[in-house]
């Protein structure tokens, strides 16, 4: 696994993303258990059985589940505290962090909704923001799923759109993506900058995919549209 300097180089001078091992697995496991309690309610089933049962939910049930998970407003701090070294390396100890981390549930199958190609800058976050995305279980390349397009290619596509005065228009939304999806073990996360295009193709599995993501930036860097309604101040303890 790469060291902190190599990860930082990947983000700034390399592909724009990097996979790393979560440092505080005690905190990350507590985060997973908090999410699991909401999903399973009074069921005694294990995590993978619950993931399988989610695949049978309709859109309304998935939406209600996502709303209930959004009530766990402490997840963003738990995610940040799971990865202190890389975050301090990039942004120092005083941060703006997303008020509510996103718990994302994706269903397998060709006819299920997928996340179209996009980049974080289109949603108005600062160019100084980083995003950490972590699955709550193993994900394999064979199953397919989330992909990332490197900085160089992402920049070329964005500049082509910019010349036409368009942001995330038909060219991006109708792209056929041939990038290989990320393969990750539970306990690994991917960090990427806001210029990296990414999305989610249909994936093959009997189980739903459950992941969490959070955005953060240095307190010393300016904000754009995503201001203190979206972000909150956080400082790592000494």
Image (cartoon, rainbow, N blue to C red):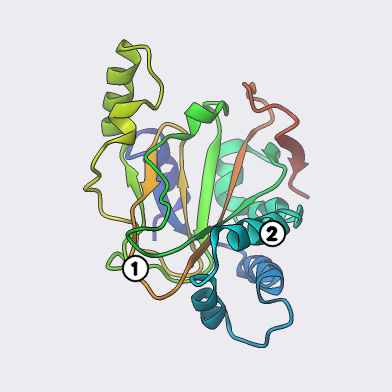
Quadrant position of the N terminus in the picture? bottom left
Q: What x and y, as percent, mark residue 146?
A: 38, 53
Considering the numbered disc 1 on the image, is that residue within a helix, a strand or a loop?
A: loop
Whole-number angstrom distance, CA of label 1 to CA of label 2:
25 Å
Q: What x and y, as percent, mark residue 9?
A: 39, 39
Instruction: Provide the residue designation for mark 1.
Output: 140
As drawn, the label of residue 69 is 2
Viewer-closest of 38 and 16: 38
Considering the numbered disc 2 on the image, is that residue within a helix, a strand or a loop?
A: helix
Q: What x and y, as percent, mark residue 37?
A: 71, 74
Figure label count: 2
Q: Is residue 103 left or right of residue 8?
A: right
Q: Residue at x 57, y 78 (%)?
A: 50
Q: Name which of mark 1 and mark 2 comes first in the sequence.
A: 2
Residue 100 higher or lower than 60, as above or below = above
Q: Residue at x 44, y 73 (%)?
A: 207
Residue 152 higher or lower than 180, as above or below = above
Residue 11 higher or lower than 122, as above or below = below
Q: Residues within 10 Å of mark 1 (few under 14, many from 20)?
A: some
Q: Quadrant of residue 91?
A: top right
Which residue is the extreme one toward the bottom? 44
Q: Quadrant of residue 157?
A: top left
Q: Residue at x 56, y 26 (%)?
A: 124
Viewer-closest of 151 and 158: 158
Is residue 6 among the parts visible in the rendering? no
Q: Is residue 72 left or right of residue 102?
A: right
């Amino acid at each position: 696994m790469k060291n902190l300097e190599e990860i930082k180089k990947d983000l700034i001078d390399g592909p724009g993303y990097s996979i790393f091992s979560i440092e505080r697995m005690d905190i990350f496991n507590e985060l997973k258990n908090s999410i699991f309690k909401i999903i399973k309610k009074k069921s005694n089933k294990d995590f993978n059985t619950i993931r399988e049962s989610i695949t049978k939910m309709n859109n309304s049930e998935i939406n209600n589940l996502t709303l209930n998970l959004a009530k766990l407003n402490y997840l963003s701090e738990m995610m940040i505290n799971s990865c202190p070294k890389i975050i301090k390396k990039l942004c120092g100890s005083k941060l703006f962090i997303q008020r509510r981390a996103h718990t994302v549930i994706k269903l397998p199958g060709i006819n299920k909704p997928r996340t179209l190609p996009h980049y974080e800058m289109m949603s108005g976050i600062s160019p100084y923001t980083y995003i950490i995305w972590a699955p709550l279980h193993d994900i394999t390349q064979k199953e397919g799923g989330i992909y990332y397009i490197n900085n160089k290619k992402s920049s070329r596509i964005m500049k082509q759109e910019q010349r036409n005065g368009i942001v995330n228009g038909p060219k991006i939304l109708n792209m056929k993506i041939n990038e290989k999806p990320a393969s990750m073990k539970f306990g690994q996360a991917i960090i990427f900058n806001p210029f990296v295009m990414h999305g989610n193709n249909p994936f093959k599995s009997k189980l739903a995919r459950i992941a969490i993501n959070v955005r953060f930036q240095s307190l010393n860097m300016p904000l754009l549209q995503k201001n203190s309604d979206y972000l909150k101040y956080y400082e790592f303890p000494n």
